[in-house]
Image: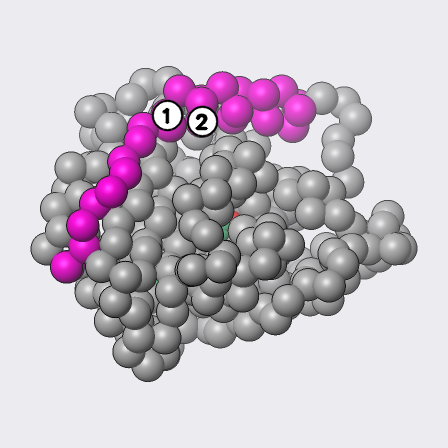
Amino acid sequence: MDFPSQRLADHYQRALRADNVLAQIDAHYPAGPSLHQLAPLDQLHIGGVAASTRLLERLDPTTHGKVLDIGAGLGGLMRQGAALGFQLTGLDITHGFSALNKALSSRVNQPAAPLLTWVTGNASALPFADNSFDAVLFQHSLMNMADAAKAITETRRVLRPGGQVVMHEVVSGPNVAQLRYPVPWATSTEHSHLITLVELTRLLEAGGFTVEHAEDWSQIALEWRQRQRQKEQAPRQAVLSPQWVFGERFLIMGKNLVDNLAEGAIKVVEIQASC
Ligand SMILES: C[S@@+](CC[C@H](N)C(=O)[O-])C[C@H]1O[C@@H](n2cnc3c(N)ncnc32)[C@H](O)[C@@H]1O
């Protein structure tokens, strides 16, 4: 793994105590956790399960069933997709995340989960043959990528003709210069590679895609994050929380997300394109 990739993986794995997470889950959910019980841990994006539901609703499992999730993290979106009949491969550069994603999938209380596959790898050099997938998802991962154009070119390569890419991403807002760190995807500018929705649209078009849908979710995202923050500060905490991944630093990360959305430093968007 090259040095920048290792630095990014270190950012995500630094506070991760996978064995403790699994022991906590086994103790509290002996019959296996539900997708909703896992969500505070494994849906590491703004909007939680509801955002993943909206993203998956943009695809039809009967026509676009073979799906690659780029930057799958701990796999909340993958397991939700599997429950709807999609066959998902999760790719992530952070090996500790891929390993925990797999371990969580073996514990989850999900009837007849279809095949899930986990691969540690880089979006800039996808370890898959041309035309391998019907659809590719990005959920809060492109923002970590210094070369978004390369990730989009690679996405196009592994998609079959008629394939779809659906993204639920953080992009830069009008006041991005005031972005407050740390945020969950970066403690400084080193790992934060935000572009505007207009730039993202252009990159997709330059990469051979036709953009079919683009929507700004920022207001919904802000309201959702405000509600999460109240829960995170309540005296009785849920069993699982993003703090199991990010440690104590999530307290300030969560506050900064609210401030960054409220101040227009970031936006949350959904974009869908076909090839
Ligand atoms: C904020 S997390 C989001 C995880 C997951 N998509 C979710 O929404 O819960 C970003 C993820 O993207 C992964 N990632 C960032 N850059 C990547 C790259 N170049 N190739 C593959 N994965 C990458 C990180 O390791 C991390 O797991």
Residue 250 in the image, given as x and y percentages of width and height: 55, 38
Q: Is residue 134 left or right of residue 250?
A: left
Q: Residue at x 18, y 43 (%)?
A: 201
Between residues 66 and 259, which one lies in front from this camera angle? 66
Q: Which mark is residue 241?
A: none
Mark 1 falls on what kind of element?
Answer: helix
Q: Disc 2 vs disc 1: Cβ atoms closer than 8 Å?
A: yes
Q: Count residues near mark 1 (Cα–Cα under 10 Å), then give few for <14, some for 14-19, many for 20+.
A: many
Q: List the single residue furthest toward the bottom.
A: 129
Q: Which mark is residue 221?
A: 2
Q: Residue at x 38, y 65 (%)?
A: 134
Q: Quadrant of the N terminus?
A: bottom left
The response on whether ligand 1 sits within 8 Å of label 2 is: no
Q: Is residue 22 left or right of residue 163?
A: right
264 within the magenta span:
no
Residue 273 in the image, given as x and y percentages of width and height: 26, 49
Q: Quadrant of the C terminus?
A: bottom left
**Mark 1 = which residue?**
218
Q: Residue at x 21, y 45 (%)?
A: 211
Magenta-drawn segment: 207-233
Q: How is the image coloured?
A: one colour
Q: Eyeballing the image, is 168 above or below 174?
A: below
The response on whether ligand 1 sits within 8 Å of label 1 is: no
